[in-house]
Structure formats: structure tokens, C-alpha cells
Amino acid sequence: MNFEEIKDRFFKLRNEIEQFGRDIRIVVVTKYVSDLDVISKLSEIGVVDIGENYAQEMEYKYKELKNKNFPVDKYKWHFIGHLQKNKVKKVVPISCLIQSVDSVELLEKINLEAQKFNKVQNCLLELKVSDEPTKFGIEEEKIHQVVEKIILLGLSNISICGLMTMAPYFENPEDTRHYFKKAYKVFCDLRKKVKNFDILSMGMSNDYIVALEEGANMIRVGSLLFGQNSSSRKLRD
């Protein structure tokens, strides 16, 4: 994995994003990056936010970097994959932001784990914008009800900071626009109900431009920076 190429791609991406004239966070997805030296070097080019999809891999990379005396707090660690309840204990101690909360029950589990660390865990609700059976998330017609239930519960170790969503994959990124428009509307509606509801995480390597045009202020990119053939340790939940 040529780090100079990664650097050039990241700077090109950052320059593209600056054209939008607003604050946009780039979460660099490292799920397919097995080389810990590459992950540690990302901080040298200005990467702040990194994302992992699997609890076991996040924990492994965090601990291994720490063992190598890398200051792991240089990064804000995002958990962006489907989170099973029995893996919450691995994710909460590390995560700055859990982006994929898809049920009240999962949120309650996160709240209990965060209490152990005297931590307020930042979370995003995952909105399901497509009918794909492989996609997780809360359906549009249910999300207002879910938010009202969360507000009533008053979970003291949870902060709901916004929405995350994932559009279906299309060869033509323009085909994702409808899904991102839908997510932005839900985001604006919920923003009226929830304090500090500021993050709209949508857009990945193939469709981030359309997502940004439709209001995203956080994108998640991996293959755009590391290429399609980057290798990964095959740890899975």
C-alpha cells in the first residue's frame, strides 16, 4: 500500500470538499487496512476521524496501536457497522461516535455500558432509506416514534447527535440522490425535536459528492483512499 498515493488522494478529497464552503468531516474507513503503520501515519496527513465496521477489529487495532506506543487518542474512533448487543462492551470504551444505532434496545445496552465508564456516549440513529434486506436501520415511518421513546427514557449516558444512512450501491451515483434527499428531510424534521442533533453522516467512496450536494456534513470513505484491493485481517463479529 503506497502511502504517498493515499496522501495524494486524501488531499484531493479534502480540496474537493472545501469547495462546498461548510464544515464537513471525513471519516476514513480503515476496515480493509491491515497495516497498522499505515493507520498510524494517517494522523500525519491530517486525518482525525477513522471508522471501523467490526467490533473485534476495532478493538484489535486500537489495542495493537496502543501497544506500539501510538497515541490512539489522536484519532476520534467511529463505529460504523451493524452493532450486535453482545459486542457493545468492545465498542463503547473506544468509540467517539457510534453511528449505527438501529433500535431502542441497542441504545439502552449502550447506555448501561457507558455508565461503567462514567461516559456520555455519542450516537447516531441509523435511518433505513431503501428496501434492501441486507441493510439495517430504522425505517422512515418509525423513526419519529423511536425518537419520542428515547426522549421519554431520558438515557443519561447517551447523546443522540444526528443521523447516519447508507444508500443502495449504483454504478451511476446520481441514482442515489433520491435516498439522500429523503434522509435530509428526516434529519431536518428530527432536528426540531432533539437538542444538539447536528450530524448527517451519509455518502461513501462512490456517492459522496451527491450526498454532500444533498446536505451531508459527514462522509465515510475507504476504497477511495486505499484502493479496491486493500487487505484486511478476517476478524468478524
Image: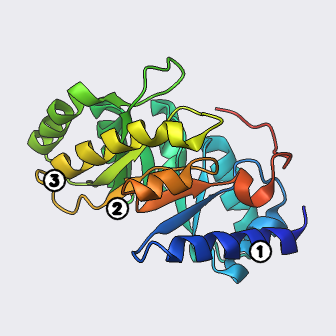
Residue that badge 1 annotates? 7
Q: Is residue 122 above or below residue 75?
A: above
- Secondary structure under tag 3 reads loop
Q: Is residue 178 above or below residue 37?
A: above
Q: Is residue 190 visible?
A: yes
Q: Earlier in the sequence, mark 1 or mark 3?
A: 1
- Secondary structure under tag 2 reads loop
Q: Earlier in the sequence, mark 2 or mark 3?
A: 2
Name, please, the residue furthest toward the right.
2
Please name the amino acid that badge 2 sits on.
Answer: Lys
Judging depth in this view, the residue of 219 and 77 nearest the camera is 219
Rate crowding at label 3 as few (under 14), some (14 to 19) or many (20 or more) other CA atoms within 10 Å.
Answer: some
Q: Is residue 162 above or below residue 125?
A: below
Distance between mark 2 and mark 3 Cα atoms: 20 Å
Q: Earlier in the sequence, mark 2 or mark 1?
A: 1
Where is residue 229? Give x, y as percent.
86, 46
Where is residue 38? Give x, y as percent.
81, 67
Judging depth in this view, the residue of 170 and 75 nearest the camera is 170
Q: Residue at x 73, y 51 (%)?
A: 223
Which mark is on residue 194? 3
Which mark is on residue 119? 2
Quadrant of res 22: bottom left
Q: Where the C terminus falls, by quadrant?
A: top right
Q: Where the N terminus falls, by quadrant?
A: bottom right
Please name the amino acid that badge 1 sits on.
Answer: Lys
Rate crowding at label 2 as few (under 14), some (14 to 19) or many (20 or more) other CA atoms within 10 Å.
Answer: some
Please name the amino acid that badge 3 sits on.
Answer: Val
Nearer the observer, disc 2 or disc 3? 3
Distance between mark 2 and mark 1 Cα atoms: 34 Å
Q: Is residue 94 visible?
A: no
